[in-house]
Image (spheres, grey):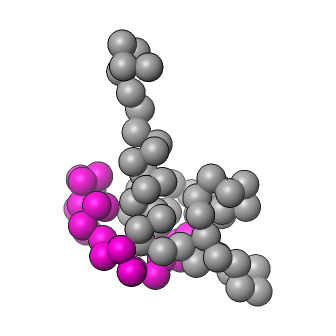
């Protein structure tokens, strides 16, 4: 996957992702992704202290995180 953030939106909605996958895609530390899951910022499922994120939820999270220009706020 290239570093183009728009490639993220080509993920299938049904794709199952782990925090490690997301951390690699967006070049963030895996603990940051886990923290977003724990805080409920990134919708996820927790099975035995392992987080699973659905592609559709990740794409929605990314769209909500988009920074808006000052005049759009």
Q: Can residue 62 be seen at all in this image of the molecule?
A: yes
Q: Is residue 25 above or below residue 55?
A: above
> Compared to 65, does 30 lie above or below?
below
- In the displayed structure, does residue 71 sit left or right of residue 41? left
Quadrant housing residue 24: bottom left
Give the quarter of the image for residue 46.
bottom right
Question: Is residue 33 within the magenta segment?
Answer: no
Residues in magenta, as a range: 1-21
Residue 3 or residue 68, whichever sits in front: 68
Q: Residue at x 46, y 63 (%)?
A: 58
9 on left or right of 50 = left
The relative height of residue 42 versus residue 67 in the rendered view (above or below) is below
Q: Position of residue 68 (x, y in %)?
A: 38, 27
* Residue 67 horizontal side relative to residue 5, left or right: right
Q: Residue at x 39, y 48 (%)?
A: 63
Q: Residue at x 41, y 71 (%)?
A: 55
Residue at image point 71% right, 85% down: 47
Q: Position of residue 53 (x, y in %)?
A: 53, 73
Residue 15 included in the magenta stretch of the image = yes
Choose between 32 and 52: the one closer to the eye.
52
| Residue 9 in picture, x, y percent from top left | 28, 61
Query: Which residue is farthest right?
Result: 48
Total of numbered circles in the picture?
0
The answer to whether residue 24 is visible is: no
């Amino acid at each position: 996957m290239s570093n183009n953030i728009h490639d993220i939106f080509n993920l299938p909605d049904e794709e199952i992702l782990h925090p490690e996958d997301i951390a690699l895609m967006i070049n963030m530390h895996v603990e940051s992704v886990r923290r977003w899951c724990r805080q409920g910022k990134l919708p996820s499922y927790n099975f035995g202290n392992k987080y699973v994120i659905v592609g559709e939820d990740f794409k929605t999270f990314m769209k909500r995180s988009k920074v808006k220009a000052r005049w759009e706020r």
